[in-house]
Image (cartoon, coloured by chain):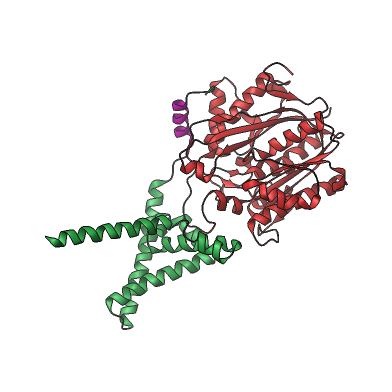
Chain colours: A green, B red
Amino acid sequence: MPLHTNEKYKQMIKRFSPKSPCFKNCVRAFFVGGLICFLGQWLFFLYGYLGLDEKAAGTLVTVSLIFLSACLTAVGIFDRIARFAGAGTLLPVTGFANAMVSPAMDAKSEGYVMGVGNKMFTVCGPVIVYGTLAAMLYGVILWIVSLF
Amino acid sequence: MKENSRVIPFIDPPYFLSFAAVGGREEGEGPFGHLYDHIDESGAFGQKSFENAEGEMQRLCLSLALKKSGLSEHALSLLVAGDLQNQCVASALGLYTFGLPYLGLYGACSTCAESLLCLSLALSHGPFERGAAVTSSHNAAAERQFRLPLEYGGQRTPSAAWTATAAGAFVLGKRGRVKITEGIVGRLIDGAITDASNMGAAMAPAAADSILAYLRDGAHPLSEIDLVITGDLGRTGSRLLCALLAEEGISLGEKHKDCGSLIYDPKHSDSHSGGSGCGCSASLLACHFLPMLERGELSRILFFSTGALMSPQSTLQKNNIFGIAHGILIEREV
């Protein structure tokens, strides 16, 4: 480098790059994430009231939240909420639904097979792969433990 | 030309015959929105895909520029164009209908100055009479190729920039009022940056390197230059550039303008550090700086387009992101 040594430049970058507003992001994530869980809990009560047992109601809550965030992604609102909420929308199942629907929407111009079908997993592929792997490992460990 | 000089003087300097700028909604809402020749609110430009939209943007931009000069495409003998898509496919999609000899350039966000530099070389030192340089970037097409899906919900870091949906077209010939008299070919500069969301930091050392090269080898000292314009360093990159130049004892002060920092209103957009993409500097040069030169409000400017050379694969493979900055000296005929 003729201008500076890289180490020196690294420090310069640190000094001049704006920091992410971590505290503000955490507060927003806490409240929006909490609000989503609150909505989920009320849906759970509602499904229970409508006569579903606990397991079925729980599953239906997940399905409802996925459906809702998929719809919000489709009409272009989800990304605006997520820009505000950050991890608040990313961590619950809503983030997963958005990560599936958004690449699928993008890839529509490349056709349904090689476009939508192929690109749908570009964002959440790692989550599926390593989620499944973790579940398998957990199963194996549980099985080994159960032997003793 | 001096030995080891990095500045190329154009013996028979090419002149700007006409130019045009086209943009999308965000650019239209920016401080220079009213100066664009055409704004497409949807960003789709009547096309089915964003990739095609970028092509249409180039076609429209060149057509508008040609209309202003009163020339037909047959008057041109060379097209030099580039964009951010693989194989410069937007340029190909947009410009094939003109049926002209075509050179596609890929310089990431440095394409605007690179294309003007190459065209100037061809016109000044070659047999060509007239030619056009076209540069574009499209936010949606670039996001899809380099980053995340458009509707993906997430927060971006404050150092990240917003790829401009914009294009600039320039028709160059042998007579006119505003001319390109010198060119600086940028060097590949490694600032040891691996963070793809801090492009300003990757490009600032390259901009500093090219500016220093001009001040060392160019025909005019800084005192004779009205503005030193950089492409898309953004606010983060601009601060870094000033700090790097200060180390060399150079202060640009108010003379430095960065297209990325100017194109959007920071209060009303999600642009964070500013605008980026090769259309950013191309459109602002066409809609703001060149008209100022024509009106006589400026007489000599140094224009640098800055590029960060990376691909999604190269960043995942932990390669450093190289920066490059090509420059041209634009002067008004006295």
How many numbered badges does the structure rendering display?
A: 0
Q: Can residue A77 be seen in this view?
A: no
Q: Is B61 situated above or below B113?
A: below
* Quarter location, residue B211: top right
Residue A101 seen in the figure: yes
Left or right of residue B277, residue A52 in this image: left
User: Furthest residue to the top?
Assistant: B3
Q: Check the picture and name the quadrant holding the N terminus of chain B.
A: top right
x and y, in percent, of residue A122 in the image: 48, 56
Classify B252 as above or below B161: above
Residue sitting at x 72%, y 43%: B81
Instruction: Depth check: give the residue in front, B242 or B44.
Output: B44
Q: Which of B283 and A29 is in front in this view?
A: B283
Is A8 within the magenta? yes
Q: Which residue is drawn at 57% across and 34% down?
A: B323
Q: Give the residues in magenta.
A: A5-18
Q: Is the magenta stretch mostly helix, strand or loop?
A: helix
Which residue is situated farthest in the bottom direction here? A51
Report whether A139 appears left or right of B290. Answer: left
Residue B300 percent coordinates (x, y): 75, 29
Judge whether B155 appears above or below B281 on screen. Answer: below
Examine the image and state in which quarter residue B239 appears.
top right
Was residue B108 drawn as part of the magenta stretch in this picture? no
B81 vs B11, left or right, is left
Camera-side residue of B190 and B213: B190
- Quadrant housing the C terminus of chain B: top right
Expressed as whole percent of the image width and height from the top left, the position of residue A145 reads: 16, 59
Image x and y of residue B272, in percent: 53, 45
